[in-house]
Amino acid sequence: MSVVTLLTLARSGGFHVQRRALLTAGALKGDRRLFHRLCSARLSNSRFDPDGSGHPTTWDTFGIWDNRIDEPILLPPSIKYGKPIPKVSLSKVGCASLIGQRKENEDRFQVSQMTNSVLYFAVFDGHGGPQAADFCDIYMEKYIKDLIAEEQDLQLVLTKAFLEIDKALARHLHFSGNASFLSSGTTATVALLRDGIELVVGSVGDSRALLCRKGKAFKLTVDHTPERKDEKERIKKSGGFVSWNSLGQANVNGRLAMTRSIGDFDLKTRGVIAEPETKRITLHHAHDTFLALTTDGINFIMNSQEICDVINQCHDPKEAAQLISEQALQYGSEDNSTIIVVPFGAWGKQESSETNYSFSRNFVSSGRWA
């Protein structure tokens, strides 16, 4: 879409689009008559009414996106990138966290508008006590926000933030005087969305981020476990060792099921690091349905495509988050189950067949399925 077109729409007072509804630049170029009608149309109830009939034409009329979530267009980013970019409203984001069979819920999650252009989403899965997860829950956003003021590269921002908060947590626990806190740690999976189109994810541990695109699940993170050859080699080079428990799960020094985390300072000299792996992706709102952040109570019992299929059956992200967390427990998960579902432009476009309950899952709640 040209800058002239976007400015024309802006002068008309702005408009809300139905989510199936954003026309691609190619569609506008391919039909000059449609282009002329849209540019000259007056607005009715924030939607086009080109024929003056009093029955406004919704974007969904053109058969592109679903019509269940209304979102305004982000005009400056749309002009910057040359295509319409819908706003991702925090009020539409779905979140759920269930304690499961544990005595305490050590999962934490955050959703916020960090700056005018950046949204912040994060899940933390604590272990060895909630101290590390609580610390990240309180301070991670601040560390990232301070770094964004000085650095434009969001991947670099996340890497620095993870390392700095790990050092800050070490100081905090040292002054607490409680030696048992040295074994407290947490996973951290953080997603930053800038201008509604630039998605950057950083992660340590085994919490995950996945993107649903055209109905298919794309993992944006890779679990940091001793089963990974590169991770195992670093542990061994640092003087640590890998052993397997009775369930066949690999552990660092017989204690920790992950090779990267924030905290776990008793294993820092054995190769457990806080440096995240990061990934940047440009969203395509015509095809991207949602981003999901999950803790292992969900992603060790449901694979990524299952999560994608179940969410695609739901009417809205809030319903989806609640359903997934409950589904994980039904499938036999005993761990805390936390999920964040962030809807994008193609929400509702993909519909999946119903996923049936499998009784056999009750016996594999500790297995990795994805």
Image (cartoon, grey):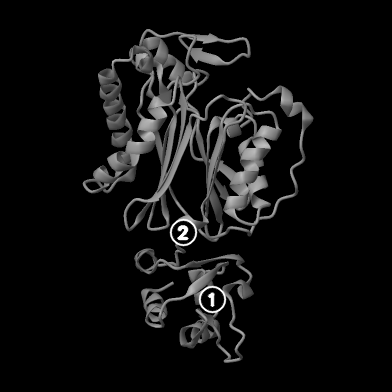
Residue placed under numbered mark 2 in the picture: 89
Q: Residue furthest left?
A: 150
Looking at the rendered structure, the number of numbered marks drawn on it comes to: 2
Q: Is residue 261 visible?
A: no
**Placement of the N terminus among the 4 image quadrants:** bottom left
**Placement of the C terminus among the 4 image quadrants:** top right
Whether residue 317 sits left or right of residue 87 in the image: it is: right
Residue placed under numbered mark 1 in the picture: 30
Q: From what the image shows, is residue 308 above or below residue 51?
A: above
Residue located 65% across and 44% down the image: 323
Can you tell which of label 1 and label 2 is closer to the viewer?
2
Residue type at numbered disc 1: Gly
The image quarter in which residue 51 lies: bottom right
Q: Position of residue 12 (x, y in %)?
A: 41, 83
- Whether pointer 1 and pointer 2 mark residues with C-beta atoms closer than 8 Å, the reply is no
Residue type at numbered disc 2: Ser
Residue located 51% across and 68% down the image: 24
Q: Earlier in the sequence, mark 1 or mark 2?
A: 1
The image quarter in which residue 81 lies: bottom left
Residue located 77% across and 27% down the image: 360
Q: Position of residue 287 (x, y in %)?
A: 56, 57
